[in-house]
Amino acid sequence: MLDIGRFNSLTVLETGTHGAILDGGDAGRLLLSLQQCPRGLAPGDELDVFIFLDAEGDPVPTTRRPAAELGQVAWLEVVNVTDIGAFVDWGVSKDLFIPFAEQQHPLSIGRHTLVKVYRDNQGRLAGSTRIDHWIKDEAVGLKQGEKVSLMIADRTELGFKAIINHEFWGLLYSNELYKRIRKGEQIDGYIARIREDGKVDLTLNQPGFSKDKIGGVSNDILAALEAGGGFLALTDKSPPREIYATFQVSKKVFKQAVGALYKQRRISLESTGIRLVER
């Protein structure tokens, strides 16, 4: 049975001037257009295709990768608004429909919004901007230190809400961010802490930064000091973004490397920066 809204591995039955015929099982023979057929495709080959439904509700295969599969969230552009709802471009030939009932706020053409892909009670693929209805506050099955996929959502007083693995809410604290992030951006992050109430604190810092990596950052700091005549205008009070712009590491890692150099008596710490100790 076809898994609508996701990628399926289908067998090529035949190829011709119009494209390839794929074995859709109970759905019958499915035509993949010639423009989407990989070069050298032959009968008997297995091909991964995304399956969506056309206006008549019939399954359509495509080798194009949509911005989101069934159950996932993506940052999508509104391309049309009608008297029955809105449509967003999600990367396949048929735009994704968002009914008015699933719109958190009225949508307008040209704007982007976070959209959750779901199947309605008639089995059709649709989108929802009512993200809170789909994403859980309490995380299940996650572990502290685990690497996860994050979709950045709204900004709050404390930081940014982020969707973890398309399933759970988490929070990135502003005072721990070392680079600029924006709503709709998809980035990797880590589970910093799972609270007693099941809510998740997130971090962009990889846990357990190794001594070898700290040593590499220390060497970068020494090189910057030598290039700058023995002085570097960064301290442990410098904004995280300034540190990241210089060394592409978080403030926490920078402070660990500076601490290691200070213990080795390679540097001295001043109110306005770091000075190389002559040896």
Image: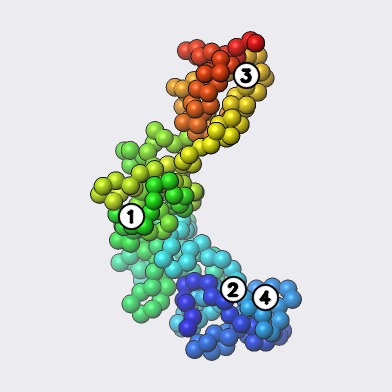
Neighbour tally class for label 4: few under 14, some 14-19, many 20 plus, Cα within 10 Å: some
Q: Point out the tag, 2 or 3, that comes first from the N-terminus.
A: 2
Q: Point out the tag, 4 or 2, that comes first from the N-terminus.
A: 4
Q: Using the numbered discs, state the Cα–Cα distance from disc 1 to disc 2 in whole angstroms.
A: 31 Å
Q: Point out the tag, 4 or 3, that comes first from the N-terminus.
A: 4
Instruction: Single out the residue that lies furthest toward the top.
Output: 278
Q: Point out the tag, 1 or 4, that comes first from the N-terminus.
A: 4
At label 1, which amino acid type do we have? Ala
**Position of residue 35 in the picture relative to residue 69 (left or right):** right
Q: Name the residue under label 1.
A: 139
Q: Which mark is residue 37?
A: 4
Q: Name the residue under label 3.
A: 225
Please state which of the two labelled residues, at mark 1 or mark 4, is closer to the viewer: 1
Q: Which of 14 and 276 is in front in this view?
A: 276
Q: Is residue 166 visible?
A: yes
At label 2, which amino acid type do we have? Asp
